[in-house]
Image: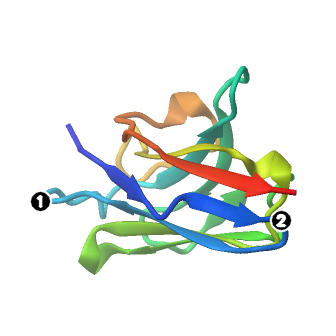
Amino acid sequence: QVQLVESGGGLVQAGGSLRLSCASPGRTFSSYAMGWFRQAPGKEREFVASISWSGTWTTYADSVNGRFTISRDNAKNTVYLQMNSLKPEDTAVYYCAPGRVRYESGSSISDFGSWGQGTQVTVSS
């Protein structure tokens, strides 16, 4: 089972930027798509972005498209989420997860598994 560690969250003002990282110490997920999800208080976990195993293909939720960028460095076993023009509604705990099946991607929670502990992002107005 892949163990993931998210980092980079924090408190930022609206309009600001953060860069989240998701690392897998000692384990490789280079053959798996990776996804970022978020969960706000009282709400269900939702899809944010995903990237194919090779990094060729990316998919974004409509709410973040054009503001967030997902990328990966397979040599470092790390996936990133660059978040720009942050809004208060982006406030949530952000999680990363690998795809359940090698070489297959998706945009549903059911397509991903092995969740990390998450990192808190708080955007003040």
- Separation of residues labelled 1 and 2 (CA atoms): 36 Å
Q: Classify 10 Å Cα crowding around label 1: few (below 14), some (14-19), many (20 and above).
A: few
Q: Callout 1, which amino acid?
A: Gly
Residue in the image at 55% along x and 47% along y = 120
Residue occupied by mark 1:
26
For residue 61, say whether it is visible. no
Report whether 115 appears left or right of 71.
left
Residue 100 marker? none
Q: Which one is nearer the viewer's eye here, 34 or 11?
A: 11
Q: Quadrant of the N terminus?
A: top left
Q: Give the SS element for disc 1.
A: loop
Q: Exactly how many numbered labels are in the figure?
A: 2
- Percent position of residue 53, x then y: 42, 63
Residue in the image at 76% along x and 74% along y = 16
Residue in the image at 26% along x and 76% along y = 76
Q: Give the SS element for disc 2.
A: loop
- Percent position of residue 31, x then y: 31, 59
Report whether 120 appears left or right of 13.
left
Residue 39 quadrant: top right
Report whether 113 appears left or right of 108.
left
Residue in the image at 79% along x and 56% along y = 124
> Vertical placement of 116 versus 65: above or below?
above
Residue occupied by mark 2:
14
Residue farthest to the left, as pictured: 26
Q: Mark 1 or mark 2, which has the lower sequence index? A: 2
